[in-house]
Image (tube, rainbow, N blue to C red):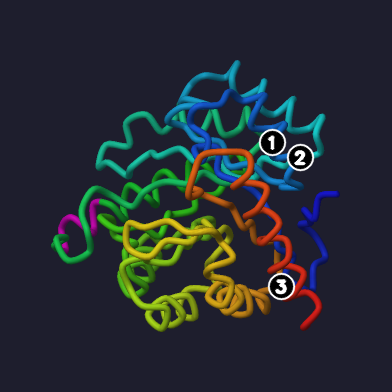
Amino acid sequence: MPLYMVNNMSQTVFNPGIVSVTFRSLDIKSIVSLSEKASLWVIEWGGDIHVPHGNIEAAENALALCRTAGIACRCYGSYYRLPESGEGFSDVLDTACALGCRLIRVWAGVRSSADADDNYRASVARRLRADAETAAKRGVGITLEYHGGTLTDNADSALRLLDDAGADNVYLHWQPNQFESFEYNVAALRRVAHLVDSVHVFAWRGNDKFPLSDMSREWSAYLDILAGEGRAIDLMLEFLPIECEADLLRDAATLRALIDSVSVSK
């Protein structure tokens, strides 16, 4: 049954889930069915294929199917990048609300932190603050994907952006950097754990993908860091070695075992 909890929480609750773009070739109904079979109780719907911006019918269909299956839609994976104009955000927000999501995942601009000057950073922070204020009026927050090529490509830059934006409803959607060392990722997560609401879970080293069990040691350490945060945190499987049911069932079982091991140790 779902682990999803929100209120009166004294301990961290990890929600096992999946990012819908892990199965780009499947339709909404098939993804819900697979998630239920794999005992994954949260789906992050992708705005680039399964639930496009402004497609309210697709959003309502996804929500209805998820509710029937006992699956939560907490975050809309919009792939919206923070442009200076904010063009298109109203469609993104409408779609997220139709999905019943309380968060919208966005990308923090189109430049890496190393390539961003102060003027560019200020423009992204202004746009983020404005979009966050708009979303807050409808009870929705924004979570920034911790991703290369954006202003959240490292802990220092991510923390600076959130500080510059000054919005209370902005969080981080963390994932390890597969091109950096385990020690680097542990240090980064410790810096930003208090802001993490969701995590993309995968087993990559560079461009090579592996079964999640191959990186159990690493993921156990990441979950141990997050275990003290005292809130619901979604752990979303993303990008399996092969886009197939067998790989999903295998990695979902590993993810649930990792969650259980953290729960037992606390």
Up-down relation of residue 65 to residue 134 (above or below) = above
Q: Residue at x 70, y 63 (%)?
A: 14
> In screen coordinates, is 30 left or right of 162?
right
- Tell me the CA gap for discs 1 and 3: 29 Å
* Residue 152 percent location from the top left of the image: 34, 62
Give the residue at mark 2: 37
**Local crowd at mark 2 within 10 Å, few (<14), some, or many (≥20)?**
few
Q: Nearer the viewer, residue 174 or 151?
A: 174
- Tell me the CA gap for discs 1 and 2: 5 Å
| SS state under label 3 | loop
Type of residue at label 1? Leu
Residues at circles 1 and 2 in contact by the CB criterion of under 8 Å: yes
Give the residue at mark 3: 230
Up-down relation of residue 160 to residue 199 (above or below) = below
> In screen coordinates, is 106 left or right of 4?
left
Q: Which residues are magenta?
A: 118-123
Q: Nearer the viewer, residue 81 or 240?
A: 240
